[in-house]
Structures are given as structure tokens and as C-alpha cells.
Image: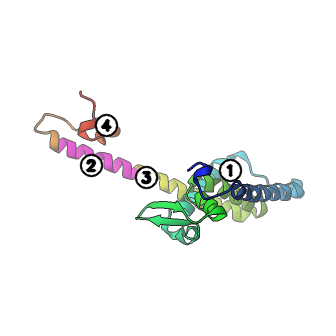
Amino acid sequence: MDPLDQTPTRPTDYALLSAAYSALLGTVAFAASRRGRQAEQICTDELVPLGVATFALSKTLVHEKVEAWVRRPFVEYEGTSERRPRGRGLRYAVGELMTCTRCTGTWSALGLVALRLTHPEAGRTVISVLAATGINDFLQSSFAWSKAGASIAEQRKDGDADAGGDGTGPPWERAAPAATRSPA
């Protein structure tokens, strides 16, 4: 992210975003306190699924093609994967938010907590679906990484057969190009 003086924004653009977030956070906190003991509280056992759900939601909003319609007013695309904030001022600041998984995650967490506090059953359902999505994403990435490591090991084994190599070693060494591997 570029420093403020290198963007087409003013400090007030970011102040507006901060004020909106703070107002929403305050509203959620106030609503929860007004419900008092009647409100179903979020217990510590729910924090990990809530965190995974937040990750999944923010990743979907920032990176997935299915949500491009949400980003389009604020983000421009260069090539197939390069994304940049669009416009000037508040529009640009929102574009920065929509290209940052961690930044969008803060807003996602607020929305999920608000849903969980105001509509506990619906909140638990949405959080469960998003948490399962996040776990699935992790497992898919792990599978792809391990499959790539096995493929590289097989290529090395085939390529090193004449040189006497066995193609073994940890995946991070197998994934390194021959020119960058340390000598044995």
C-alpha cells in the first residue's frame, strides 16, 4: 500500500472509513449491551470458527471472481490478476480496502459478529459454512502444494538418474530451481 502522500486521497477519506467502521462497531456493541443477559454471548469456543469464517469471507470478497461485481466500482484490473484501486478520494480509499484481505477481514469480522449477536442461529449457520469453506481452501492449497512437491520429486528423480541423485529431500528443497539449491 502506498503512503498517503503518494495516493489520490486526503486524510479525510480515510477518516470517513474509520468513522463508518467505528459507528458500526459502536452500534453493535450498544445493541449487544442493551440486550444484556438476554443476548446469547459469543463464547471462546466460537472464536476459531469465527476467525476462519472471517478469512474465508474476506478472501472471497477480495480475490474471487464471483465477487468481482462488488469490487468493480472501486478496483480496476490490469491483466489477469493485477488489481489497483480506482478513482480518487473516498473511492480510491475503498478500492484500497477492497484489494487488502486483512483490511476487508476487519469489516468481515464485524459483520459476522453482528450477525451472530443479533440473529444467533443464522449467525452460527453462516459462520459454519464460511469456516468449512476456509478449511476447504486450506486443504485444497495443501493438496496442491504436496502434489506439486511430488511432481518435482519425480522430475528430479528422472533427471538425476544419470547423475546418481535419488530425488528425495524436503519439498522446499525439491521446489527450488537447480541453480538456487545449496551444494550437497
Q: What whole-number distance in Å separates the C-alpha atoms at marks 3 and 4?
A: 18 Å
Q: Measuring 79% from the left and 52% from the top, which residue is drawn there?
A: 41
Task: Choose mark 2 or mark 1, whichever is in front.
Answer: 2
Residue hosting label 1: 46
Near-viewer residue (84 or 59): 84
Taking the spot 89% from the left edge, 57% from the top edge, the residue there is: 34
Q: Position of residue 9 (x, y in %)?
A: 64, 58
Q: Which residue is mark 2?
A: 151
Residue type at mark 4?
Answer: Glu
The answer to which of 112 and 74 lies nearer the viewer is 74
Name the N-terminal-most of marks 3 and 4.
3
The segment highlighted magenta reads 143-158
Residue 85 at x, y percent in the picture: 55, 61
Question: Is 125 positioned to the left or the right of 160 in the image?
Answer: right
The type of residue carrying mark 3 is Ser
Viewer-nearest of labels 1 and 3?
A: 3
The mark that comes first in sequence, 1 or 3, is 1
Kindly check if marks 2 and 4 are in contact, taking CB atoms under 8 A apart as contact. no
Screen quadrant of the C terminus: top left
Secondary structure of the residue carrying numbered label 2: helix
Q: Residues within 10 Å of mark 2 (few under 14, many from 20)?
A: some
Residue 91: give x, y in percent of width and height. 63, 65
Looking at the rendered structure, which numbered label has been put on residue 173?
Answer: 4
- Report the residue marked by disc 3: 141
Extreme top residue here? 184
What secondary structure is the magenta-colored segment mainly? helix
Q: Amino acid at mark 2?
A: Ser
Q: Earlier in the sequence, mark 2 or mark 3?
A: 3
